[in-house]
Image (cartoon, rainbow, N blue to C red):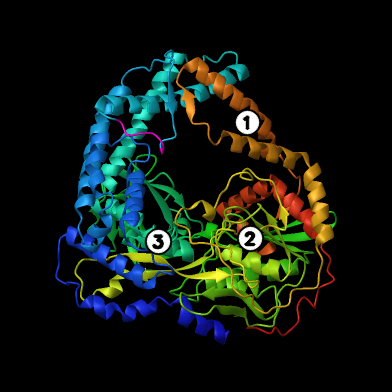
Amino acid sequence: MKRIVEFMKRNYKVILLITALSAVLWSFIPNQKKEDPEKDKLLLELLTFVLEKGHYSPVEINDNFSKKVYAKYLDGIDPTKRFFLQSDIDEFSKYETQIDDMIKNKDLTFFNLTNSRLLQRMEESRAIYKDILDKPFDFNANESINVDYEKLPYVKNKKELTDRWRKQLKLQALSSITDKQTLEEDKKTKDAAYQAKSFDEIEKEVRENSLKSLNEYFDFIQDELDRNDWFSIFLNSIVERFDPHTFYFSPEDKEKFDVSMSGTFQGIGARLQKKNDAVEVSELISGGPAWRGKELEAGDLILKVGQGKEEPIDVAGMRLDDVVKKIKGPKGTEVRLTVKKVDGSLKVISIIRDEVETEETFAKSSVVEKDGKKFGIIYLPKFYISFENKQNRDAFKDVAIEIERLKEQNVDGIVMDLRDNGGGSLETVVKMVGLFIPEGPVVQVKAPGRNPEILPDPDKKVQYDGPLVVMINNFSASASEIFAAAIQDYKRGIVVGSKHSYGKGTVQNVIDLNQFVRGSSYGDLGALKTTIQKFYRINGGSTQREGVKSDIVFPDRFSYLDMGERDEESALPWDKIEPAKYNPMNVNYENIIANSKRRIESNPNFKLIDENAKWIFERKDENVFSLNLNEFKKQMDIADTKIKKFKAISDYNNKLQFQSLPNEVALFEKDTLLKQKRERWHEDLQKDVYVDETLNIISEMKLASRGKALPQKISMN
C-alpha cells in the first residue's frame, strides 16, 4: 500500500509540477478586476500554458491546428447548418488559419464575431420556424431531404435557409404524424367506438407540438445560456484538439463532474427541471433530506428560496443553474422553499441540507440460481471515489462489501458487469483488481519522458478466488479496461461481451485553474481535465484505440460499426512497451470458450441480434428521405417490417429469478423507491440474453484454482 500511496503522490498528481511553474505566470497575469472579455483572454492564456507544459503529448499550435479548431467550433455551434449563411462563412473564413495566432495574442475577434452572428441568426430563426409552422405542410410534393449535414453546403441566402428549415421541420412532422396515425389505428382496433383523429387534426397537433418544443429550446438558449457558456464551447474546440479527453470545465461543469465522480453532494436531494418560468421538482433522491422529510413532492413548483431565517428570494424566471446553487449548500444548514403544490396550495417547506448519495452511481448486486447453482452479479456503473474525503463511499470499498455479502450467500461464481462503465479513479481500480489476485502488478503507467512505472496490488490477501467473468461492451472504458485487461492477462477470469471495449488508454487529471492566479478578482476560472499519462497492460500492450478484446464475443447492435476511441480524430496512437513480470494462472479456458461459441452460433436470439447489427451497418449511410407522405410511408414500412422482426430481441425473457440480498430486502418496507429500482433492474436482467449466456459460461468454470490462484510472490521490473 505504501508504494501505491507514494506513486499517487508522485504521478497521479504529476501535474503538480505545473504548479511549480505558476510563479512564471504570476509575473504576467494581472490581478485587478476586469470585464468578462479580459477574463476570457486570461483563460486562453492559462489553458494554452498548462496544455503546452502538462499534456502528455502537446500538439503544435499552428495553421493546421487552427483549421481543425475552426471546423470543430463551427460544427459545434451550427451542426445542422440551419443558422449561418454562406456569406457568414465567407466572412469567418479569413480567420481559418489565424486562430493559432489569435490564441497566442489573446485576440477574441473571431469568437466575438461568430458568437454575435450566431445569436443574431438564432433570433432571426424564430420568425422563420414560426412562419413555417403556422400553416399546414404540403405532403403531396415530390421532394426529399439529405440529412448528411456534414457534407451539405451552407445555404446561399435567407430563401434557401427558410427552405432548409422547412424541410427539416417537415421531416420531423412526417415522422410524428405516421407514429400518431399508428397509435390512432391501434386505439380504433381495441375500441370500435373510438373516434380516431383525422389526418388534419393530427397534422395540426404535430405542428403545435413542434412550435412549443422549439419555443422552449430557444427560450432556454436566450434565458439559460450566457457568454461564458458559449465561450466554453469555443475553448473546448481548442483543448479537444490535444486529445478527446482533454476538456475545459466551467465552474458549474466542474461541480457536476465532482458529483459524478464521487456519487455524493451536499444539498436536499431533489432533481429539478425548468417548466416555463418556474422550477419543478422532477424526482426526489431516495434517502435524501427531502425524501426523508416527506413534504416536498415530485411536481411541486419552487417559487422562492430562503437561506435559514433570511428573506426568501423569488426564483421565477431565474436560470435553473442559479436556482440549484441557491438550494444546494453545506451539510447542516437550512433552506426554506416556498412551493406551489400540485393542488394549487402554497407551502413553505424547511429542509436541513445533508450529504446526498446519487444511488444510481453505486455498486449493486443480485443473486440468481441456474441449473442448481447460485451466482452473484455485481453491477458497477463507474469507478467512483471522493478525492476530498476518503471516508466517503468508493467503488473499491463497496465492491469488497458486495463480495462478502455474496460469499455469505454461498455463490458458485461472480459476474462483474462493467458494461457502459466509462471509468473513473485509477487508484480505485488498482485496489479492486487486488480483491481477486494476490500481490502483483496490475497496470503500467507512463508519464512523458519517464520510464513506465508499475502500479501493483501489494496485498497478498485474495478476497474472492472463485470463478469470475467480466462483462464489457463498446462503452466500457478507461478504468473498466484496466480491470478487464488485468483479469485477462492473469487468466484470473474470462472477459465476455463486445468484440472490444472503448479503447481509452489514457489517464487524466483535473487541474484547478484558480491556483495559477494570485489574488484574482475575476471569480472562479473553472478547471482543465487534461491527459497526463498513458497506461499499459501488464503484458505491455496499450488499450489505447484497440481496447480489450473479449475472450468470448457476443453479437451486439454495433458489431459491424467501428466505435470507440479509434473513431476520434484527435485520439493518441496505440503503442506498446516492455511487459511487466507476472505469472498468469495455469488454467485453460479453451473448452469453455469453444462451448460458448457453439451455443452462441446456434442461439436464435444471437442470430437475430447479428442480423440486426448487419442491418444497422447497411443503413448507416442512408441519408436521403422522401418528404412525400406516401413515399415516406413506404420507406418507413420497409424499415418497420425489419424493426418488427427485431422486436423479438427486446421481447426475450430468460425466465431467471434475480433476488436482492438480505441487507437490501430489509430496507424495502421503508424505502419503496429503492425496491422499485431493484425490481426494474431485475426485470432488465431477465430480458438480457447476454447475462443468460454469461451464467452458462461461469457455470462451466472449474474451482480447481481455489486457494492457489496465483503464486504468493511476483517478481517485477
Q: Is residue 640 above or below residue 478?
A: above
Query: Which residue is at the front of the view, 203 or 315?
Result: 203
Mark 2 vs mark 1, CA separation in Å: 31 Å
Residue type at numbered disc 3:
Phe
Residue 49 coordinates in the image, percent (x, y): 30, 69
Secondary structure mostly taken by the magenta-highlighted segment of the chain: loop
The numbered mark at residue 485 is none
Mark 3 vs mark 1, CA separation in Å: 40 Å
**Earlier residue among tags 2 and 1:** 2
Q: Give the labeled residue for mark 1.
A: 643
Give the label, 2 or 3, closer to the camera. Answer: 3
Residue type at numbered disc 2:
Val
Q: Is residue 507 above or below residue 623?
A: below
Q: Quick check: can you spot residue 279?
A: no
Q: Is the residue under label 1 in contact with that under label 2 (CB below 8 Å)? A: no
Magenta segment: 150-155
Q: Give the labeled residue for mark 2.
A: 548
What residue sits 82% from the left and 54% below the top?
594
The quadrant holding residue 36 is bottom left
Residue 347 coordinates in the image, percent (x, y): 33, 49
Give the label, 2 or 1, closer to the camera. Answer: 2
Q: Is the residue under label 3 in contact with that under label 2 (CB below 8 Å)? A: no
What residue sits 57% from the left and 68% below the top?
395
Q: Give the labeled residue for mark 3.
A: 242
Left or right: residue 621 compared with residue 131 = right
Q: Is residue 596 above or below residue 488?
A: above
SS for dot 3: loop
Give the label, 3 or 1, closer to the camera. Answer: 3
Q: Quick check: can you spot residue 575?
A: yes
**Earlier residue among tags 3 and 1:** 3
Residue 497 magenta: no
